[in-house]
Image: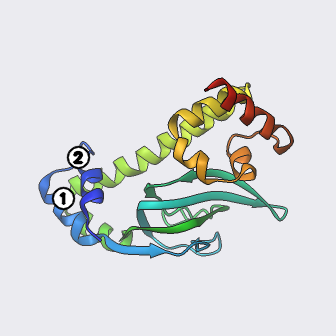
Amino acid sequence: MEHLDLISRIAQFKSANSKNIKLLESLFMPITFRKGTLLSPPEHAYPILYYIQHGLVRGYYLIEDQEYSSWVIENGFLLPLNGTVNNQISQQYISFMEISSGWSLNLAKAELIAQNDTQLNRILIEIYDEKIKEAHQREIILRIPDAKKRMEIFMQHHPSIAAKINNKIFAAILHINLKYFSRIKKAYLRSTK
């Protein structure tokens, strides 16, 4: 698997330069996940940053034996959420919904190198900042009272994901009661014809 997608993604960061792009290229290792793989359950913490090149990945919470989906991505960075930075255990689970491939970066190894390379630190901070902004965007969408509007925004930004996930996951991501979800989805689809 070639690094081209990863390299072009890293090159988009303001702090990126040819030296640290080359360094990160050498530190990221190829990885493939089988469908159903559970990444870093809450009771285990691994200091690894992932870049998913292609696939389908879901973040969810398990509350009273019920899964509540929070997000789904096809590509992008996955942060280690389970206490690797602040020693606070996240309750989020991350699972792969289809065979997915990408790259992994051992953050403990990167941290040693970054002690002498402020630009590398800045790139890692930009990655974390990007993920924080994505979480804020999800929160903003969930604050919209009109479920049809939430559906419209999601479909505008993630049409291919919408086609790959079932209604239960889709409804949970948009915080719509499953009982009403099919009707809202049908109304949305009719309005786009």
Q: Residue 112: horizontal and vertical position, in percent?
A: 28, 71
Q: Which residue is mark 2?
A: 15
Query: Residue type at mark 2?
Result: Ser
Q: Residue 55: horizontal and vertical position, in percent?
A: 48, 62
Q: Is residue 124 above or below residue 94?
A: above
Q: How is the rendered protein coloured?
A: rainbow
The residue positioned 34% from the left and 74% from the top of the image is: 30
Q: State which tag comes first along the sequence, 2 or 1.
A: 2
Query: Residue type at mark 1?
Result: Asn
Q: Residue 172: horizontal and vertical position, in percent?
A: 73, 47
The tag on residue 49 is: none
Question: Quick check: marks 2 and 1 in contact, CB under 8 Å?
Answer: yes
Q: Which residue is mark 1?
A: 20
Which of 97 and 109 lies nearest the eye of the viewer? 97
The residue positioned 34% from the left and 55% from the top of the image is: 124
Q: Is residue 93 visible?
A: yes
Q: Is residue 115 visible?
A: no
Which of 23 and 111 lies nearest the eye of the viewer? 23
